[in-house]
Amino acid sequence: MKNSRPTAKTADNAKLETTDGSVIAVSRALTMLDAFANGEREVSLGELARRTALHKTTVLRLARTMAQHGYMSQTPTGGWRLGPAAGWLGARYQLSYDRAAQVEPILRELSQASGESAAFYVREGDRRVCIARVDGNQSIRHHARMGEAIILNRGAAGRVLLAFSGEPGAPYDAIRRTGYFITAGERDPEVASVACPVFGLNNALVGCVCITGPVARFKKAAYERHAKLVKAAASRLTYELGSEMATGR
């Protein structure tokens, strides 16, 4: 009769993994990195524990381990901040999209023509990520955060990426028919946006281009004008990125 008791290796794996197969320690470490808000210089150990719902001793062990690899650093006051390795990781992610060199000039022209901020988003699983942006010249404007992962079902850019990734449903059918989408206050009550898909070789979705700004400036006439500008920018990007992929540049 075979021994049905788990081996030491099996037992260790059970302690390390969750029911979905993810590694607990890695998940906790990534949760720690996600706990830092945009622009924060440092966060106390207690606040990190509160944000991650982890015990202080666990947070401290994780922070010290990540500090050894440069992903976190302890400040002279005893708090913690993101380390240089975290910044380099973000930079490498952005550089992996070599299309940014083609995207940014068109975003700059779009921003100048509309007076609003322009950005280019790509889909990463169930999130959208900004890989290129140009801020508008208005004193009050919306800033897309480079590298920030945002849910797809809120905001024009996310809706467009869902629609042209084949998401079923009447709202997405309507987006596919019009070829663009407009939202006002859907993800942020103060922000309006207009987005349009960008395609590459064989009509494959590459990402989407959008402009964003305060809801107060996006009246009906502005929406119509912005929609034309965004569609024109998306057409140019589709042509340039599709040509680049076809020639293998």
Image (cartoon, rainbow, N blue to C red):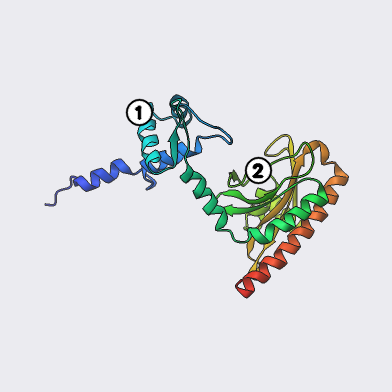
Q: Look at the numbered disc 1 and give the secondary structure of its residue.
A: helix
Q: Measured from the top left, where is residue 131 in percent x and y? A: 62, 52
Q: Indicate the amino acid at tag 1.
A: Thr
Give the answer, above or below, for where 67 lies relative to 181.
Answer: above
Q: Residue at x 68, y 61 (%)?
A: 102
Give the answer, above or below, for where 53 lies relative to 2.
Answer: above
Of callouts 1 and 2, the N-terminal one: 1
| Residue 11: assigned label | none
Q: Is residue 206 left or right of residue 19?
A: right
Q: Residue at x 77, y 50 (%)?
A: 111
* Residue hosting label 2: 154
Instruction: Return the residue nearer the eye: 177 or 230.
Output: 230
Q: Residue furthest front?
A: 76
Mark 1 nearby-residue class (10 Å; few <14, some 14–19, many ≥20)? few
Instruction: Return the residue nearer the eye: 84 or 46.
Output: 84
Give the answer, above or below, for where 119 lies relative to 83.
Answer: below
Q: Look at the numbered disc 2 and give the secondary structure of its residue.
A: loop
| Residue 57: assigned label | 1
Q: Measured from the top left, where is residue 225 in percent x and y? A: 85, 51
Question: Quarter holding the C terminus?
Answer: bottom right
Q: Measured from the top left, where is residue 156 in percent x and y? A: 70, 47
Q: Measured from the top left, where is residue 209 in percent x and y? A: 70, 54
Quarter residue 228 falls in? bottom right
Q: Indicate the amino acid at tag 2.
A: Arg
Q: Residue furthest bottom?
A: 247
